[in-house]
Amino acid sequence: MFLRDKLDLDAPLITAWSTSPSPEIAGALAACPFDAVTVDMQHGSHDESSAFASMRLIHARGKPGLLRIPVGRNDLASRALDMGFEAVIAPMINTVADAQDFADSMKYPPVGSRSWGPMRALELHSDQTPGSYFKSANRETLAIAMIETREAHAALDTILSVEGIDGVFVGPSDLSISWSNGEGVDPGRPDMQDALADIAKRAREAGKFAAIFAVDPASTPLYSKMGYRLTALNTDPGVINAGAALMLEAARG
Ligand code: 3PY
Ligand code: MG
């Protein structure tokens, strides 16, 4: 089942967040009961070769892979789809023009101008005839725009109205910096919570989905209640630390 279809099911989804440039660690995350694995090329240490090798091991575990590109790297967005990622997350989409450029690189005509060449994606597709992939790719691969500034929040409805944008992804840390006019970073800022709920509501009303990054695992159920369909749960070092703390507590009694 495609990530798009899983997002429509009752239970909200949780993705792991891979930052270490190690396909083995990304594969290990995919072997955990996460619903998906996101490979981060914006702030994570992945380069193209570690990201694309990670996708192979994520797929081998039967999980969908998402890739976060660095700011403005729409060339990498369509390349990620060619390599078999089901979704691309684009950071700092602040204007409708940013959203249109991103969507344009992600969708085949007539919606956008993605260039043909789904090398690895075609191998992974159930029907490997090029015509079949061409017909279904625009539906089965997801363009996800990050909303992480006041400017993006103000432009939300126009960003959501872009045909090739499938969903939005809130970056609460960057949003908190913008929300506080640069006073500090606090993804849990109490005065931002209504805006977070509003983003999820407006995405749903536009027929699209909302996702969000959860630094604190305890915020995941709150985000789900707000209507977020996908939450990213911390990062690979965070998962290792939390697992080590539990194991050491058991070991030391
Ligand atoms: C943010 O919170 O700003 C993010 O980009 C999460 O990764
Ligand atoms: Mg951010």
Image (cartoon, grey):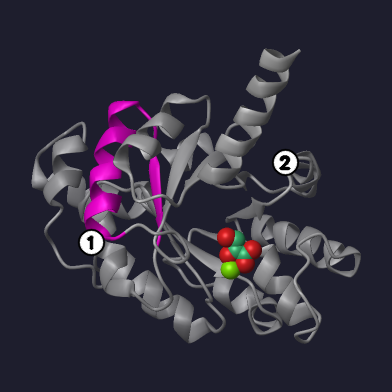
62 magenta-colored: yes
Dots 1 and 2: beta carbons under 8 Å?
A: no
Segment colored magenta: 47-68
Residue, disc 1: 79
Please identify the residue farthest to the front as the structure is shown: 252
Amino acid type at image mark 1: Arg
In the image, residue 234 above or below residue 153: above
Mark 1 packing: few (<14 Cα in 10 Å), some, or many (20+)? many
Secondary structure beneath dot 2 equals: loop
Can residue 53 be seen here? yes
Residue 109 in percent (x, y) is at 24, 68
Front residue of 61/216: it is 216
Residue 146 in percent (x, y) is at 55, 67
> Which mark identifies residue 16?
none
Among the 4 quarters of the image, the one containing residue 7: top right
Secondary structure beneath dot 1 equals: helix
Front residue of 157/222: it is 222
Residue under the image location 35 percent in, 27 percent down: 62
Residue, disc 2: 217
- In terms of sequence position, does the residue under pointer 1 or pointer 2 come before the other? 1
In the image, residue 110 above or below residue 235: below
Front residue of 72/7: it is 72
Residue under the image location 29 percent in, 43 percent down: 55
200 magenta-colored: no
Mark 2 packing: few (<14 Cα in 10 Å), some, or many (20+)? few
In the image, residue 208 above or below residue 6: below
Residue 149 in percent (x, y) is at 66, 78
Residue 131 in percent (x, y) is at 12, 48
